[in-house]
Image (cartoon, rainbow, N blue to C red):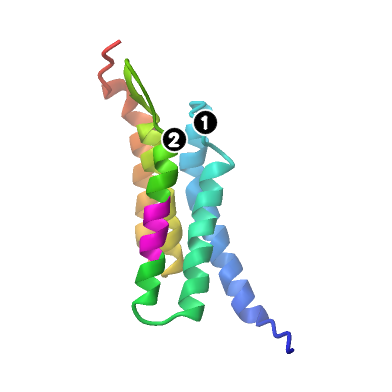
Amino acid sequence: MEFDINFQLMGYHLIQLVIAFLLSLPIALNREMKDSGAGLRTFPLVTIASCAFMLVGMDIYKGDAEARIMYAIITGMGFIGGGAIFKSEEGAKGTATAASLWNTAAIGISVATGRYEIAIILSIVGFVILQFSEPFKVNNR
């Protein structure tokens, strides 16, 4: 059995994972500061895992298999996001966290596919919405 490591490819993937990690931090910090359950550990892990799944899939599979990996990530994030939502008589809590988890998965996918402009926009817009939209939220309590 041959053990072959491509250090150049490893370095390239490391850079992509670091970019994905860094772009998740504004959203993760916001959620951590608001004590929303998911925070500095969850969001970066979602982002780098999504990026890694896409990177591995793009290296191994060709054609529409890459799209299927992306669909699987999207579906999985919907499931995980659903677990972040708590419903009560007062309404639902955690919807912003769930949507943010989905957003950070999209950041990871965007970085993996080389669409850095999309990843940067998603990071900025996600942070701005979470940071500055709360005063406009109507509370029915």
Is 74 inside the magenta-drawn segment? yes
Outermost residue, top direction?
A: 141
Q: Are marks 2 and 1 in contact (CB under 8 Å)?
A: yes
The amino acid beneath tag 2 is: Ala
Query: The residue tagged with tag 1: helix, strand or loop?
Result: loop
Chain-order first, disc 2 or disc 1: 1
Position of 66 with respect to 10 (left or right) is left
Q: Is residue 106 visible?
A: no
Quarter occupied by residue 88 = top left
Q: Main secondary structure of the magenta part?
A: helix
Answer with left or right where residue 82 lies relative to residue 29: left
Q: Is residue 26 above or below residue 16?
A: above
Residue 21 image offset from top left, x and y in percent: 54, 53
- Residue 105 coordinates in the image, percent (x, y): 43, 53
* Amino acid carrying mark 1 in the image: Gly
Residue annotated with mark 1: 37
Left or right: 35, with 129 as reference point: right
Left or right of 137? Residue 87 is right
The magenta stretch is: 70-76
Q: Residue 9 or 128: which is nearer the viewer?
A: 9
Q: Which residue is mark 2?
A: 84
Task: Estimate how packed mark 1 is, as few (under 14), some (14 to 19) or many (20 or more) residues with alpha carbons within 10 Å.
Answer: few
On residue 121, which mark appears?
none
- Where residue 1 sits: x, y (%)? 74, 89
